[in-house]
Image (cartoon, grey):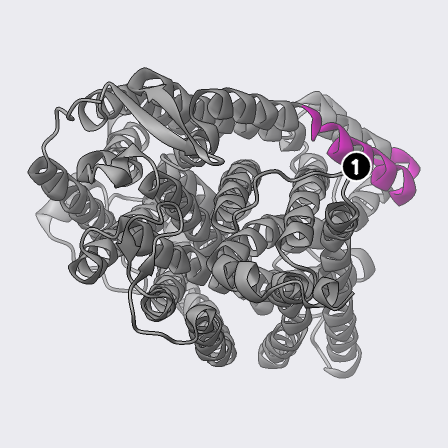
């Protein structure tokens, strides 16, 4: 088997150092963003002048330098920040109750596997050895669940605070040029990306070290207990994604239908009562929700890899460096993303609108290329040249270069999925332009073209995922699939940076409109926002692709832990599970879509009421009641997020207890297969409709000008398509990847209980 080149001490230094470097880099980026002052403060040092923060404005248009306009930006920013903070605190109160209740459930179920015995038991995979009692697994799984949940909540909250801190600063920098605004928005996104990646890695590493003090040589029990970390992360992500998604889309749909379609006023017009709620929603849904979602994917892929490795030669021979290979890959990913970020902010400067999207795409290409080299080095120094991987009851021999290919294929599959997503959702290419063109004949043809585009966009990503699965499983069984998912997420800091950039730019445009800034400023923020829409779609593509691989890896770990040798779809027990599992994403989507519809209905009624009853609102002489709209979105999202969340969390428990592990394995397989397809098509359809609308509004080409301008029949049809697509791309689609991951990791955590006490109905007959 052989030893690794990197000693254990080197690994113990490398992982925490990389995590600390990531946190330090994010704080440095935050410091640079904070140098842009919001308000009328004109005191700058000579260093500020040198860095361009006190640079004179490109144009001295009337009103642009007016202190009242700058002060207005600060007021709007505060309103958005307060609304987002208030919503998250309200949501976390409800989620906190669930978190405690579910933690108790984990302890009771896992502790009861051996009747709460405190005696050591024979190990699951090697009965000649003794392992720690099930009660220990119950206690430590509960602790790791709570740690994962808290880390996920903190990740989402920090991301939201950073975004609301940066939006007005991006608006103000847009006065100096599009390049300055781009750097502020991107640096702010990088703060979130690096904080999340580094925090997730550091907390997981420290948790493993602390648990190891108790478990000692029982690595099987140690890494089984660690799976609770992934469950906690995804549980919070589910509520963040669903709750945030319902919030943002209720406000967005209400603002668009009444403001743009009925009253023919611009997007983000300060006369629209729902406009603050809409901007708040961008932060709680697309920032806090996405942050928690990708943290959950990272935690679960790491946990799946560690569980499978703990019963392979790494675990049997107690090779710590090789065992923590997944964490070393993530550590190197932070360093690679750090270097990649400098290409966007320091090495090259965005000087024109047309350079924005290429600059963001280069981030993906550079990080992927550099990470490939990083993975090759890590695989060489942190793995023995030959080792064995557990493969459904037998040990499969694997070489280090094969594992490098597994991680590499996941990494490059992620890039392919990202660029295919971009092709189908960017208005620079023919698919979205065709959708925009279909608006000439009304909203119906727009909807038909958009749905067709979404279905078609599934083809290449599914082939990319299929090839990744085949290659990685052929080389290293389920461990190969787990590290392929980790490869896809290894550049998570860069992925999150370009993803968070989108909502920050969107908010910046809204603030420019509400503060009454000039048309030229709004054009710049619109250009930033259009590029951000595409990168947000790419981020969702990454999240869905990684979710498919993570779910399959967790499924493999569950099957092994539940002692199922084969999953036979011809067995009635399995086939009924397969059918029900394939139905669940439809049921879940129906619930989330209807929730958005119900919340939007209340919002539309309130916005209409204000326009009809507040004298002078349309003329701009009276101020709308923003607070009521914020409250409607908050109340609706908190109330409506509970049923979809309960569906996902309770399904594995009910199926496992009543029908047993075989039926549950069918449910997991069915939900994975159908969930991935629906998630990709829903996200891309919504993204295409959104950018088709923006294509008409921008009027950048001769073709676009024939469809416009704003307020034309084609534009109104595009707005309706965008409104239909909003809950698809920002609520149902992104939430589905959490559904398939969460059910798989929950099944893995409860696998010992299901294997021992499950299948009550089948035992009765």
At mark 1, the secondary structure is helix
* Residue 169 position (above or below residue 429): below
- Give the overall secondary structure of the magenta segment: helix
- Residue 66 placement (x, y as % from top left): 39, 60
The residue shown at (73%, 25%) is 431
Q: Nearer the viewer, residue 400 or 196?
A: 400
Report the magenta residues as a range. Answer: 439-459
**Which residue matches tag 1?**
450
Task: Kindly indicate the quadrant of the structure image that contains residue 658.
Answer: bottom right
Residue extending farthest front: 128
The residue shown at (30%, 73%) is 118
The residue shown at (52%, 51%) is 562
The residue shown at (7%, 39%) is 9
- Residue 307 placement (x, y as % from top left): 38, 46
Q: Is residue 527 left or right of residue 142?
A: right
Q: Nearer the viewer, residue 197 or 702?
A: 197
- Residue 257 placement (x, y as % from top left): 78, 60
- Residue 45 placement (x, y as % from top left): 11, 52
Q: Is residue 564 left or right of residue 170?
A: right
Q: Is residue 490 left or right of residue 628?
A: left
Task: Kindly indicate the quadrant of the structure image that contains residue 633.
Answer: bottom right
């Amino acid at each position: 088997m052989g030893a690794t080149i990197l000693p254990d001490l080197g690994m113990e230094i490398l992982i925490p150092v990389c995590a600390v470097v990531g946190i330090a880099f994010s704080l440095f980026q935050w410091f640079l963003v904070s140098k842009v002052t919001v308000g009328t403060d004109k005191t700058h040092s000579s260093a500020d002048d040198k860095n361009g923060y006190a640079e004179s404005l490109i144009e001295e248009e009337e009103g642009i330098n007016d202190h009242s306009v700058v002060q207005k930006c600060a007021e709007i920013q505060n309103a958005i920040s307060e609304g987002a903070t208030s919503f998250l605190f309200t949501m976390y109160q409800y989620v906190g109750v669930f978190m405690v209740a579910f933690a108790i459930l984990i302890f009771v179920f896992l502790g009861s596997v051996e009747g709460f015995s405190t005696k050591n038991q024979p190990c699951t995979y090697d009965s000649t050895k003794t392992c720690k009692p099930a009660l220990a697994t119950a206690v430590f799984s509960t602790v790791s669940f709570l740690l994962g949940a808290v880390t996920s909540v903190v990740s989402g909250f920090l991301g939201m605070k950073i975004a609301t801190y940066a939006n007005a600063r991006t608006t103000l920098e847009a006065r100096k040029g599009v390049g300055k605004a781009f750097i502020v928005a991107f640096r702010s996104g990088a703060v979130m990306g690096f904080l999340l990646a580094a925090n997730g890695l550091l907390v997981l590493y420290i948790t493993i070290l602390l648990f190891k003090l108790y478990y000692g040589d029982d690595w099987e029990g140690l890494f089984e207990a660690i799976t609770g970390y992934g469950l906690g992360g995804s549980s919070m992500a589910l509520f963040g994604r669903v709750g945030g998604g319902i919030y943002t889309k209720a406000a967005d749909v209400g603002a668009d239908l009444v403001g743009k379609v009925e009253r023919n006023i611009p997007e983000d017009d300060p006369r629209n009562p729902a406009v603050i709620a809409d901007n708040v929603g961008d932060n709680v849904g697309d920032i806090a929700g996405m942050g928690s979602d990708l943290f959950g994917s990272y935690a679960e892929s790491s946990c799946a890899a560690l569980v499978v490795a703990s019963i392979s030669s790494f675990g049997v021979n107690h090779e710590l460096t090789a065992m923590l290979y997944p964490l070393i890959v993530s550590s190197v990913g932070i360093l690679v993303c750090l270097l990649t970020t400098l290409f966007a902010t320091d090495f090259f400067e965005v000087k024109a609108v047309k350079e924005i999207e290429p600059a963001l795409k280069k981030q993906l290409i550079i990080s992927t290329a550099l990470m490939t080299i990083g993975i090759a080095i890590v695989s060489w120094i942190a793995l023995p040249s030959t080792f064995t991987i557990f493969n459904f009851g037998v040990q499969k021999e694997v070489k280090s270069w094969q594992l490098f290919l597994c991680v590499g294929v996941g990494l490059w599959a992620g890039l392919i999925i990202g660029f295919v997503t971009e092709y189908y959702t960017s208005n620079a290419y023919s698919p979205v332009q065709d959708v925009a063109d279909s608006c000439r004949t009304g909203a119906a043809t727009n909807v038909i073209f958009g749905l067709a585009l979404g279905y078609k966009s599934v083809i290449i990503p599914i082939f990319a995922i299929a090839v990744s699965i085949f290659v990685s499983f052929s080389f290293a069984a389920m461990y190969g699939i787990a590290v392929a998912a980790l490869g896809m997420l290894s550049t998570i800091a860069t992925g999150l940076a370009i993803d968070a950039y989108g909502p920050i730019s969107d908010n910046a445009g809204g603030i420019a409109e509400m503060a009454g800034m000039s048309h030229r400023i709004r054009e710049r923020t619109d250009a930033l926002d259009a590029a951000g829409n595409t990168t947000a779609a790419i981020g969702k593509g990454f999240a869905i692709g990684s979710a498919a691989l993570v779910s399959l890896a967790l499924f493999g770990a569950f099957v092994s832990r539940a002692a199922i040798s084969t999953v036979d779809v011809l067995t009635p027990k399995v086939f009924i599970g397969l059918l029900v599992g394939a139905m669940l994403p439809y049921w879940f989507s129906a619930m989330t879509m209807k929730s958005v519809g119900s919340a939007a209905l209340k919002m539309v009624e309130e916005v209409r009421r204000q326009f009809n009853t507040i004298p002078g609102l349309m003329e701009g002489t009276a101020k709308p009641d923003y607070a009521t709209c914020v409250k409607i979105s908050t109340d609706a999202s908190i109330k409506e997020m509970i049923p979809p969340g309960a569906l996902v969390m309770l399904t594995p428990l009910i199926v496992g207890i009543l029908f047993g592990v075989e039926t549950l394995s069918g449910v997991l397989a069915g939900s994975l297969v159908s969930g991935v397809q629906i998630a990709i098509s829903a996200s891309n359809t919504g993204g295409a409709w959104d950018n088709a609308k923006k294509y008409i509004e921008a009027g950048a080409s001769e073709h676009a000008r024939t469809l416009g301008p704003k307020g034309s029949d084609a534009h109104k049809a595009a707005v309706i398509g965008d409104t239909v697509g909003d809950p698809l791309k920002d609520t149902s689609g992104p939430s589905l990847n959490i559904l398939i991951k969460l059910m798989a990791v929950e099944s893995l955590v409860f696998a010992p209980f299901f294997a021992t006490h499950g299948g009550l109905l089948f035992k009765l007959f």
